[in-house]
Image (tube, grey):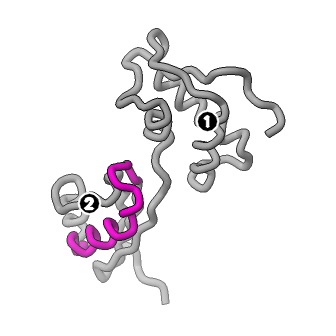
Amino acid sequence: MAKEISGIIKLQIRGGAANPAPPVGPALGAKGVNIMEFCKQFNARTQDKPGKIVPVVITVFADKSFEFVIKTAPAASQLLEAMKKSKGSSEPNRSKIGSVTWDQVKLIAEDKMNDLNAFSVQSAMKMVAGTARSMGINVKGNFPKNN
């Protein structure tokens, strides 16, 4: 018999660095989840991604037990990491902070393919390129036709 779901919590936490402090503690405490147990499990499963932002979807059941799914890092943080920048442009339509190649965009799209709403890598690449454009990042060259 399936357990009754009492809530779903979505958080973005640095890999290997979950602790009971906000935002983790208050979000989980409100649902009655054992915060330290979540922190231990999360840190164990994300120890290979230290310091990177990791989205997590926590499903809380009626008996206060939980399970969680770790997603891939956001496209925006992967783009900033590829450019070695700390943040995007404050005026993306006027000032550009740099550029990435279509090869870099393809690597990010392939990494995020499971989490994106796209059927092909080309569609995912267009989504990542749109994220880059909204951050003030140019994508060099023309879109590759057959990859």
**145 on left or right of 73:** right
Residue sitting at the far right: 146
Q: In this view, does 86 lie to the left or right of 119?
A: left
Horizontal arrangement in the rendering, residue 146 relative to residue 36 (left or right): right
Q: Residue 43: x and y, percent? A: 31, 66
Q: Which residue lies furthest to the bottom in this view?
A: 1
Residue at 35%, 60% (x, y): give it.
Answer: 9
Q: Closer to the N terminus: mark 2 or mark 1?
A: 2
Provide residue 51's location: percent of width, then percent of height: 33, 50
Which amino acid does the dot numbered 1 rest on? Val
**Region rendered in magenta:** 33-54
The crowd level at tag 2 (other Cα within 10 Å; few <14, some 14-19, many 20+) is many
Name which quarter of the figure residue 130 lies in: top right
Q: Looking at the rendered structure, which numbered label has been put on residue 105?
A: 1
Q: Does the magenta stretch include residue 52?
A: yes
Q: Is mark 2 on a helix, strand or loop?
A: loop
